[in-house]
Image: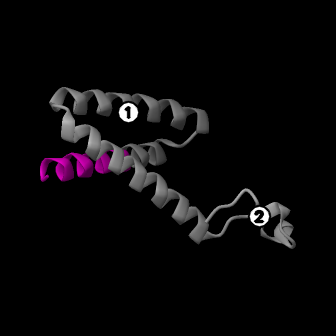
Amino acid sequence: MLSTERDFRRGGERMAIPTQGEVEGKLLVFEVVAVACLEELLRHEHAPAVSKVRRRILHNLKERCRSLKLCAEDEKATVDYAMGVLEAAVEEAGSW
């Protein structure tokens, strides 16, 4: 997993670029934490919370994509992925 201590270990300077596994692991952690939080939130809230969360996600993603200067295709893929994660959390929360 990605470690800030890597550069201080002997030979750490040779591993300055994270491996694909480290990046995938970090992304997995973010996704699992986000989905778990959404499931817990949605279990206790009603439909207005879902639409509010959806609007906030879209707004924040557009700002972040703009600051990263992502192309339109990458921005759309990012938004689609985020909405997919949200929908999966909504479905999972509804099945409890």
Query: In the displayed structure, would residue 82 be above or below residue 60?
Result: below
Q: Who's the residue at 43% across and 47% down the image?
A: 78
Which quadrant of the structure image shows residue 57? Answer: top left
List the single residue furthest toward the left.
Answer: 95
- Mark 2 nearby-residue class (10 Å; few <14, some 14–19, many ≥20): some
Residue 71 percent location from the top left of the image: 52, 43
Neighbor class of circle 1 (other Cα within 10 Å; few <14, some 14-19, many 20+) is some
Q: Is residue 80 visible?
A: no
Q: Amino acid at mark 1?
A: Leu
Residue at the (19%, 48%) spot, across then down: 93
Q: On the image, numbered disc 1 is attached to which residue?
A: 58
If you read the primary sequence from the N terminus, does the residue marked by circle 1 or circle 2 appear first?
2
- Residue 30 pos. (x, y %): 47, 52
Note whether residue 53 is visible: yes
Q: Which mark is residue 47?
A: none
- Closer to us: 21 or 9: 9
Q: Secondary structure at mark 2?
A: helix
**Residues rendered magenta in the picture:** 81-96
Q: Which residue is mark 2?
A: 6
Query: Which amino acid does the dot numbered 2 rest on?
Result: Arg
For residue 89, side relative to residue 61 (left or right):
left
- What x and y, as percent, mark residue 9? 83, 68
- Left or right of 27, for residue 59: left
Left or right of 32? Residue 41 is left
